Image (cartoon, helix red, strand yellow):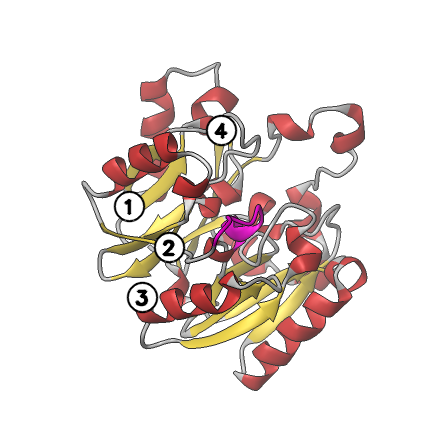
Amino acid sequence: MTTDNLTNTVYFSDLLPKKCPILNHHIVEALDANKIRYAYLSETKDIWCRDFMPIQIDEDRFVCYKYTPNYLQSPYYRSLQTNPEKVFQAPQNRLEQVTQNAITIELVIDGGNVVKCGDTVVMTEKVFVENKDKTRTEVEKILKDAFQSNILFLPWDRKEAFGHSDGIVHYAGDGKILLTNYDDSSLYYFQRFRKALEKHFEVIPLKYATKRRHARSWAYINFLRIGKLVLVPQLGLEEDEQALEQIANALPDCEMVGISSLEAVRRGGGLNCISWNILS
């Protein structure tokens, strides 16, 4: 499984410099300073590359899927739904490696609901809601066959419409997994997440010593890792330094860079959401 630590190239939507110019500037500075390859994808309708781009299994294999999530099916939001085929076929994107070595599964999935953790993929149970034409057993088999890994399903908190697992966990390697501070908003779901995860991983919950939880503190878990470079969202909050320190402790061999990310977080996503990192 091609986990983040193995990646060496990252892509973004070509809309990012226009919609999030400050964020884009800081990301480019960090990537250039660490000699990480990056490019911008044309034919995108929004900045959330993670959601519609293929999932890399190894250097030569990618999994494509149906990108028709229920939250984009109203007339207004449908106009923001990227057609992945147009992205793949655009010559300027140079995605021959993907299109030549890809399989397509007949499931509705968001890439943000796929967190690769060693030999396990973590998803929320929203995938079953999106594929009601199939039984749970059928969905599980398709996923296991495509990803060639175990699938760990977390409960879906219906208050979070997207149902993305990358807003809940991030793999730290060596059987360790970071868990966001969900207990600050729902102790019930936090306990259920932790119980499910502890059967497979050493769980490291993020905690913030503040008098009051900030509504955007979820975003820290949505950091971006390319190889040994880790870009951590910074929100202008007292939690910023605490998040950096905790993630650095979990990933001691990595270079940590704080990235001012409010432009994306205000739109509902973090640094993992706006990126697509692969081994190329």
Q: Quarter of the image holding residue 71?
A: top right
Q: How far apart are marks 4 and 3 (CA)?
A: 33 Å
Q: Residues within 10 Å of mark 1 (few under 14, many from 20)?
A: some
Q: Which residue is outermost to the left?
A: 199
Asked whether the viewer can see residue 52, the reply is yes
Q: Which of marks 1 and 2 is nearer the N terminus?
A: 1
Q: Which of marks 1 and 4 is nearer the N terminus?
A: 4
Mark 3 element type: helix
Residue 218 is a magenta residue: yes
Mark 1 element type: strand
Magenta segment main secondary structure: loop
Residue 34 is a magenta residue: no
Q: Which mark is residue 120?
A: 1
Part of the protein shown in magenta: 211-219
Q: How far apart are marks 1 and 2 (CA)?
A: 21 Å
Q: Using the image as rendered, state which of residue 206 and residue 26 is in the foreground.
A: 206
Q: Earlier in the sequence, mark 1 or mark 3?
A: 1
Q: What residue type is labelled 3?
A: Ala
Instruction: Determine which residue is flagged by label 2.
Output: 206
Q: Earlier in the sequence, mark 3 or mark 2?
A: 2
Q: Earlier in the sequence, mark 4 or mark 3?
A: 4
Find residue 241 and report its horizontal and vertical position in percent: 48, 69
Q: How far apart are marks 1 and 3 (CA)?
A: 19 Å
